[in-house]
Amino acid sequence: MSTGLSFFTSYGKLRIPVYRVYAPPLEGITPIPESPFTGRENTLFAYEIDVEVLGENFLPAYTEGDNSHVVATDSMKNFVLRQALEFTGSTIEEFLDLLGRRFLQTYVQMERLRLSGRELPFARVTVPGKERGVFATSRVLFNRSHSAYAVATLAFERDDRGVVSLLDHHCGQVDMELFKVTGSSFSRFVRDEYTTLQERVDRPLFVYLDVYWKYIDDQAFLARDHARYVPAEQVRDLLQVVFHEFVSESIQHLVHEMGQRLLARFPQLAEVSFEAQNRTRDEIVASTTDKKIKVYSDPFSAYGVIRLTVSRNA
Ligand SMILES: O=c1[nH]c(=O)c2[nH]c(=O)[nH]c2[nH]1
């Protein structure tokens, strides 16, 4: 029966917390000059996983209340947790790849799937080492840190022959909050009757920053040797180095410089994109004896947003 309506549906389970202890360590990472990161032990591999099932097969559940094809989202949660025990990889992308393939192999009624992972960052706690006065990091105790975290999204489909393929992906590092006290400017912008902002040749630049990347070839992030894998830690460190070194004319200028450096450093990437929020604080008072000593406070609550996508030409 044609109703003259069309539907798009998706359903799934969001934020499934997975705490896998003693996952295989991440090794084989190619070092870069901007970062000391060359791997991680994965003693605590902690992520929140989103499962979203797409496709037409579930429409009768909406239109007729027919659940005969519906995989309960509670079962999806259990499926993810059981797979985490069997997981033999060491990155979130590898875990999502395992989940995507196993879900579509197990449930014929699922046609397409989108899976996302959100890192729950934990840092090793510092404890006294064997020698007096020397400190080391605990191998068993971790402190949950509410800092920047890695994300990844992979989408899969099963074709008519039952072959599962990866349709799309993106990886990212989000919620960075970087404050540079000197060495950024914003001047020579349009001045008209609406302009109240002062020209600032040296401002304290505070940005909230999300960065996302896509690879040219899926094998660069799924190959077990990890030689072409781009760890979020290296991306974070590289962006911090660019911000540290580069005297920008604006956030637009800064994210462009970050994009150039990322694509130069990682030839395996096809595209990088940024979303930066301008969280620069307002200057309230400055010392009369030492000009560099100042106090800042929160600005007007609206904030500027700057987006940039940099893609390689084919
Ligand atoms: O880096 C900036 N870019 C802008 O476009 C802008 N606009 C503004 O008010 N401050 C800033 N800073």
Image: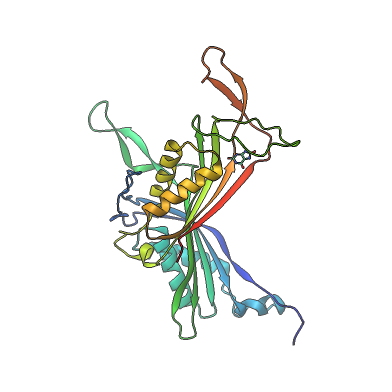
Q: Does 283 appear above or below 92?
A: above
Which colour assignment does the render follow?
rainbow
Can see residue 69? yes
Foreground of the two, 190 or 107: 190
**Which residue is at the far top?**
289
Q: Does 178 appear above or below 257?
A: above
Left or right? Give the position of 183 relative to 133: right
Residue drawn where x is 50% and y is 48% of the image: 256
Q: Quadrant of the N terminus?
A: bottom right
Q: Quadrant of the C terminus?
A: bottom left
Left or right? Give the position of 183 relative to 141: right
| Picture quarter with ligand 1 | top right
Image quarter for residue 59? bottom right
Query: Residue 40 in the image: x percent, y percent?
Result: 33, 50
Image quarter for residue 99? bottom left
Foreground of the two, 272 or 27: 272
Can see residue 119? no
Query: Residue 181 in the image: x percent, y percent?
Result: 50, 29
Left or right? Give the position of 245 relative to 275: left
Residue drawn where x is 48% and y is 75% of the image: 104
Q: Does 273 appear above or below 112?
A: above
**Which residue is at the far bottom?**
1
Query: Residue 146 in the image: x percent, y percent?
Result: 50, 42
Q: How many marks?
A: 0
Q: Does 136 appear above or below 156?
A: above
Residue drawn where x is 45% and y is 47% of the image: 121
